[in-house]
Image (cartoon, rainbow, N blue to C red):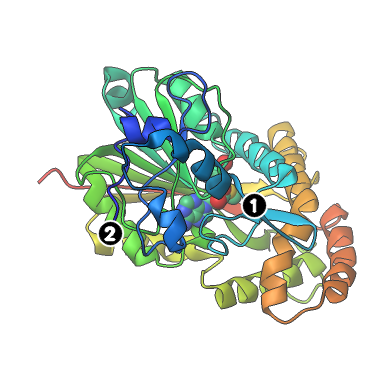
Amino acid sequence: MPPRPGPSTAPTEASSSVSLAGGIAGSLISARGSSGSSGFSTTNSAEFAFDSDMSKYPTSMTSSIRAHVYEGGLRYHAFRDGQYAFPNDEVEQNRDDMKHTMSLMVCRGAYLYAPVHDRLEAGGAEVLDLGTGTGIWAIELGDKYPVAQITGIDLSPIQPNFVPENVHFFVDDFEEEWVDAENKFDVIHIRHTLHSVRDRKLLVERAFRHLKPGGYFELQELLFWPQCDDESMTPQTPYAFRDFMTYMEQGMRVLGSELRAVMTLPEEMKAAGFADVTKKTHKCPVGLWPRDKRLRLCGLFLRTAIMDGLRGLAQRPLTALGWTQLQIEMFLVDVRKSVMDTKFHTYFAFHVVYGQKPLA
Ligand SMILES: C[S@@+](CC[C@H](N)C(=O)[O-])C[C@H]1O[C@@H](n2cnc3c(N)ncnc32)[C@H](O)[C@@H]1O
């Protein structure tokens, strides 16, 4: 197994030399933590080895982690191809940023619910953001707490080059062993990503191991099931968007993960040893039906994120169910109509769950 690049906060010679960003300190996007069993070919695995002739690494690393896979006109990550079912193209990145704004509005501006503000302000705290996406949450947290160190990891190198000095991005698969030391992090955060985790038990246990005693694991996730508190959408009402979510759940299961995993998370966290596991639930409307201005805006962001993403969301899960391209397209016509129809007063629950690794 080749040695691995060093920790995020102090990029080693190796991790620096494979930097793709070439930007200011803290903007390194490097591959890390990849072993021979990672799914890389032997040739690619060798790219991670230390060598006195480092000159060859920038080129080879760039091509391997910057590469993309194209399928049905959509672009996907190539590193650990197939691990994540959704695209990483511009449409998807815009959707992620939209959902970021929506999430902050739903949570009334809170980046974290866990009581960690003081330690993030005190200096030296380490935060890990799993599945950081465009890195927008990590970057804004880094701005808010300039003396904390924020590490974001993702399968896709889609984070910007110019970021605060205390923010570092790495290409990595968080479902593989982590290169970081155990008992290292004050906060581990994951948002809008749990639906794609294949082995939740292992992830929760791993987060526990890598947190400092007293550190917090926080997860923020939409429950992908349209709910309704009035008669506008009952279980008997024909509603193509609900059918869409049913098929998505089935397709994701075929691909290896649970779309509504957040439901069982609190119990799983307790089983892993987390204390004071707390769950807060908000409602995020689908569409412009609420009267309340803040909720209408949340609904607009969520509806736009859904509408813009339908093709990319559906492609792999519905193909996994054996659907043809034509069947998908035809079905999405009805789904779009139902999402845009303001007579349905539906919402997704937005769950925030956090727990603490006991001090003792
Ligand atoms: C819906 S996006 C959410 C991005 C970000 N957390 C946010 O809230 O803005 C999910 C991200 O998780 C990443 N991801 C999924 N599985 C992953 C894994 N096993 N390792 C690393 N990243 C992963 C995807 O590449 C994608 O960028």
Residue beneath label 2, please?
205
Indicate which label's residue lies in the foreground, 1 or 2. Answer: 1
- The answer to whether 53 is drawn above or below residue 178 in the figure is above
Left or right: residue 253 versus residue 197 is right
Q: Residue furthest bottom?
A: 322
Earlier sequence position, callout 1 versus callout 2: 1
Res. 215 mark: none
Alpha carbons under labels 1 and 2: distance apart: 31 Å
The answer to the question of whether label 1 and label 2 lie on touching residues, with beta carbons closer than 8 A, is no
The image position of residue 41, as x and y in percent, is 46, 63
Residue at (90, 64) in percent of width and height: 333
| Amino acid type, callout 2 | Glu
Residue at (34, 18) in percent of width and height: 147
| Amino acid type, callout 1 | His
Q: In this rendered view, identify the residue nearer to me: 243 or 193.
A: 193
Tag 2's secondary structure?
Answer: helix
Residue beneath label 1, please?
68
